[in-house]
Image (cartoon, rainbow, N blue to C red):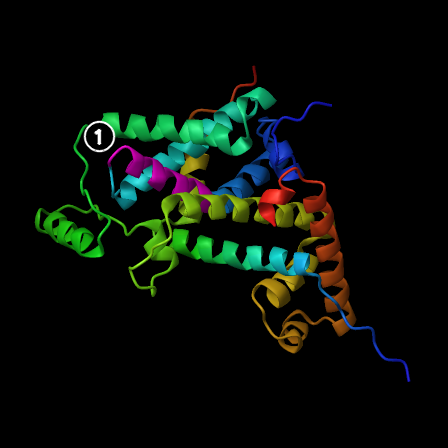
Amino acid sequence: MSKKYPSTQVSMLDRLTTGDGSRDWNRAWASFVEIYTPALQASIEREFRQVGWFKVTQEGLQTVLSSVIFKFLKSSGSFRYDPLKGSFRSYLYKIIKWCVRDYMTASNRHPLCESTDTSEIERKNNELKEQGGENRLIPPFERRLHPDANNQHPEQPDQICDRAWKMAYIRTYLEDARERLGPQTILIFEMTKVLDQPVDQVMEQLRVSRTTVDNANRRVMQLLRKLIDNSPLKDELL
Amino acid sequence: MNKKKEETTTPEDDQIIQGLREAELFYEATSRVINIPSLVEEVRKRLENEPIVQS
């Protein structure tokens, strides 16, 4: 059986390729938006910078994000994986490039800001406000990710993108595990392991026993290990 | 007395959990400027207006 997507052939993404508008498909694309928006957003912001737009407005970012997701969903039903054409991520990068250029062409204006300095962004936002505009420039992704960090060595956009995509893949495996093990099992895992809430508190909130918590965490970890072990992305993920 | 077996995690498990925790941070950084539920709704409306036709 041929794989439709490289590196990420888990059930959520597989269901997307049917493109048939079924309930399964609708659930899959809504999950896709939730899981992949950070990676898409980081990649869109990087693309804007590469073409000289150092800052983008909130409205601009949302417009491009919506177009990227829409174009991807429109093509997902007919898209077939060709290993010679590259990875799932590369495929989405191509869509991002088209959408960023379409947006720039449609907006027909010069870059709003040529610096990523916070003070420059604030100055521009004040100008925009005085002009009565609603749009606001947003701080770069690295500043939003580390709002309290000093500005000496901000994480580079390429690094941010790499991390964002890895996180999206790991979240995809968790979503796949949710389908297989059920929502409560994953909720226990998320509360105790990801959000690091005290086990006693989780037991009380969900009215479950310690054995249930331990079993849930063991089963989720086993499945995640298995999914990642079978993934061609394993070396990139860990 | 039977001692309950301690749950053990491997370094690989720790990396997976750390990855999921970082994913939460990325989600928060995104949510500061993008309302993801409204983005889903926007895409849903576009799909309703321009349904996907299977080739």
Task: Residue at 19% x, 36% y: name it.
Answer: A111
The front one of A157 and A62 is A157
Check if residue A41 falls in the magenta segment.
yes
Position in image of residue A90 (x %, y %):
49, 30
The image quadrant where one finds the N terminus of chain A is top right
Choose top left, top right, bottom left or bottom right for residue A2.
top right
Give the image location of residue B43, x and y in percent: 43, 36
**Residue A85 sits in which quadrant?**
top right
Q: Is residue A27 left or right of residue B7?
A: left
Which of the pair A11/A85 is nearer the observer? A85
- The relative height of residue A49 versus residue A192 in the rendered view (above or below) is above
Look at the image and tell me whether residue B39 can be seen.
Answer: yes
Which residue has dot 1 on it? Answer: A107
Where residue B54 appears, as percent x and y from the top left, is 56, 18
On the rendered structure, is A224 left or right of B2? left
Q: Residue furthest right?
A: B1
The magenta segment is: A38-52
